[in-house]
Amino acid sequence: MLNFSGNAPIYIQIVEKVKADIVSGKLKGGDKLPSVREFSETFKVNPNTVQRVFQELEREGITYSQRGIGTFIMEGDEIVKNLKTSQAEKYIQRFLSEMTDLGMSKEEISEYLLKVLEVSKNEDPRS
């Protein structure tokens, strides 16, 4: 379940969730997305919102539709690589903006980030 928050429209938040699921491997190339009705029930949103999600994902080249069959995730490593890059850039820009709003300089941000990464290095099995 997705908790909707912030100023972004709900359909954009769902699009971002789908993208995050692709990057994390929860969704893979060739996977079929749930139907509009199933998606609508899962996220507790209007079917028109879900239709807009599907349109946006297809417009961005992340999914494709087969009439009467469903909507599928595009296959190929390039899709995941591009999504990972664009999502990472978006999160980093948001992080930098928030840290700058706190009055931190680039040097301070870097210093804090390195400190946190060092501490979490021993905790994260992916390091």
Image: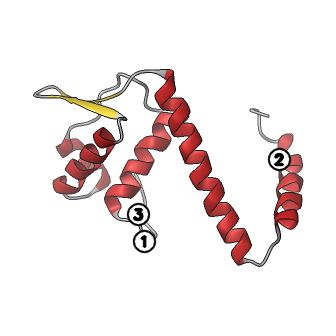
Circles 1 and 2: CB atoms closer than 8 Å? no
Q: Residue furthest left?
A: 68
Where does the image place residue 40, in percent across and percent down from the top left? 23, 50
Local secondary structure at mark 1: loop
Q: Which residue is mark 2?
A: 120
In which image quadrant can residue 116 be found? bottom right
Residue 14, position as x, y percentages in the image = 37, 52
Residue visible at 36% across and 26% down in the picture: 74
The Cα–Cα distance between marks 1 and 3, rounded to whole angstroms, is: 9 Å
Estimate how packed mark 1 is, as few (under 14), some (14 to 19) or many (20 or more) residues with alpha carbons within 10 Å.
few
Please, what is the three-letter code of the amino acid marked with disc 2? Ser
Q: Earlier in the sequence, mark 1 or mark 2?
A: 1
How many marks are shown on the rendered structure?
Answer: 3
As displayed, is residue 77 above or below residue 19? above
Residue type highlighted by circle 1: Asn
Q: Residue at x 55, y 46 (%)?
A: 87
Who is closer to the viewer here, 43 or 114? 114
The residue pinned by badge 3 equals 4
Disc 2, SS: helix
Q: Element under label 3?
A: loop
Instruction: Please report whichever mark, 2 or 3, sits nearer to the chain's N-terminal start.
Output: 3
Examine the rendered structure and indicate whether residue 4 appears above or below residue 124. Answer: below
- In this rendered view, identify the residue nearer to me: 56 or 43: 56
Q: Is 98 left, or right, of 17 in this rendering?
A: right
Residue 19 image label? none
